[in-house]
Image: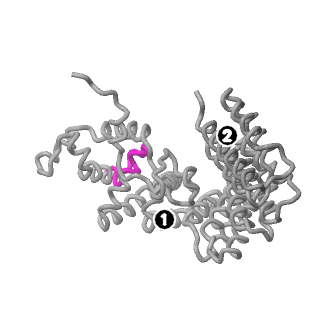
Amino acid sequence: MPTESTFILASIFIILAATGWALGYFGERDDQPPLNIDYLKGLNFLLNEQTDQAVEHFLKMVRVDNTTIETHFALGNLFRKRGEVNRAIRIHQNIIARPDISDEQRDQAFYSLAKDYYHAGLLDRAEVLFRRLSVDSLFQTQSLYSLTEIYEIEREWTKCINCAEKLSKVTRKSFDLQISHYLCELAEIAITNGDVKKSLKFISSAKKLKTMTLRTDLVKAKCEKLKKSYTNAIKIYRDIIQNSAYLITEALPELVDLHKQLTTLEELNDFIKRLSQSNQKLSRDIGYTVIINNINDISSLDDCVNSYIENDSILKEFLDISNDKKDMLKIETISVDKIKRSLYKLARSTSRYQCESCGFSSQKLLWLCPSCKQWETQRPFSNVQFDSILQRMPLISD
């Protein structure tokens, strides 16, 4: 069955035939063969579903000049958007090979070809062309953005920083948030390599930026823990929990682990009790974090779990619990540990984080959203996603 591309090419050949007829009628001829004969050859390829040959015929048939170059660009970009990247590459390479186009048109062709390579996954080839265009060309800004995306994919964080700094100068916009994340990535790599001192240098650089990520505190706390500066690490994790609700899921398990190592769980209990009494929402967020991380046998955290169960409307309905004091006793008769274990299993099968920008969800915190390519847009869910679970359940027929 003919594809959409076949119909598009057929339309182009018909338009070219009409153009050839008009030029012939009004006496504007050149040394090329009559266009109506060429177009019939092209249509013959299309009728036999030989689209590649039709494209080649189109390229030979129509000379690239100021009157036809936009048609070539439009056709190439159309093929790329439809996923027919090889055809797009052929068209854009054909434009570049022409000696009689302007420098601006050649740069446009190089930019289109770079995008073709990027969409084909040929990142090394795309990088070469984007780098060429990132210096004094009409496509400098777009090329720097594209280079940044390539370096993010390849985890070349130092190159990302260089591109972000150039973009800041060209666009006069701040890229401090992105740069602070790039520095955190470098700090994480240094930790993996056992170089805590180097990691702290990267974090120090990130903290000097006007706009920075709170991720720097998480990385710094990790460094303090590795240095066995447990008091400093505990202080940082406590500050995160008190001031950055969306990072509780990352900080609380680490804080619990430190207090267990130091056998100072009473201090932890006192800290959690003060927080719970001053902020009910924070108490419920802590309770949910305890559930999804399967943290057990700490009295203050168990109280937060109870608070979460009592205040989650969907869970209350599921357990048939109302706000009546008599009904609240049901929580005591139903094993709280059993509820926790069940919720933990459910939480493990559903997403825990969702991007505020595009809605992409995941099980673990992703600092860079893989869907919309924005930094630090994911936030944790504050309860088990029962809707998601129900959607995956098979329908029960009567």
Place of residue 133 in the rendered image (x, y in percent of width and height, measured from the top left) = 79, 63
In this view, 195 is above or below 1: below
Q: Which mark is residue 240?
A: 1
Q: Residue at x 58, y 56 (%)?
A: 373
Place of residue 245 in the rendered image (x, y in percent of width and height, measured from the top left) = 42, 62
Place of residue 396 in the rendered image (x, y in percent of width and height, measured from the top left) = 27, 25
Foreground label between 1 and 2: 2
Disc 1 crowd rating (10 Å Cα; few below 14, some 14-19, many 20+) is many
* Left or right position of 339 against 234: left
Could you tell which of marks 1 and 2 lies nearer the N-terminus? Answer: 2
User: Regarding mark 1 in the picture, which secondary structure is present there?
Assistant: helix
Q: Residue at x 71, y 43 (%)?
A: 120
Q: Is residue 299 magenta?
A: yes
Q: Is residue 379 magenta?
A: no
The answer to whether residue 90 of the structure is visible from this angle is no
Kindly identify the amino acid type of the residue bearing the numbered disc 1.
Ile
- For residue 149, what is the image quadrant? bottom right
Q: Which mark is residue 84?
A: 2
Query: Image quadrant for the C terminus?
Result: top left
Extreme-top residue of the structure: 398
**Region of the chain picked out in magenta, as a range:** 288-302
Place of residue 225 in the rendered image (x, y in percent of width and height, measured from the top left) = 60, 58
Q: Residue at x 65, y 77 (%)?
A: 172
| Inter-mark Cα distance, 1 to 2 | 48 Å
Disc 2 crowd rating (10 Å Cα; few below 14, some 14-19, many 20+) is some
343, 4: nearer the viewer: 4
User: Regarding mark 2 in the picture, which secondary structure is present there?
Assistant: loop
* Left or right position of 375 against 244: right
Kindly identify the amino acid type of the residue bearing the numbered disc 2.
Glu
- For residue 96, what is the image quadrant? bottom right
In this view, 109 is above or below 315: below
- For residue 216, what is the image quadrant? bottom right
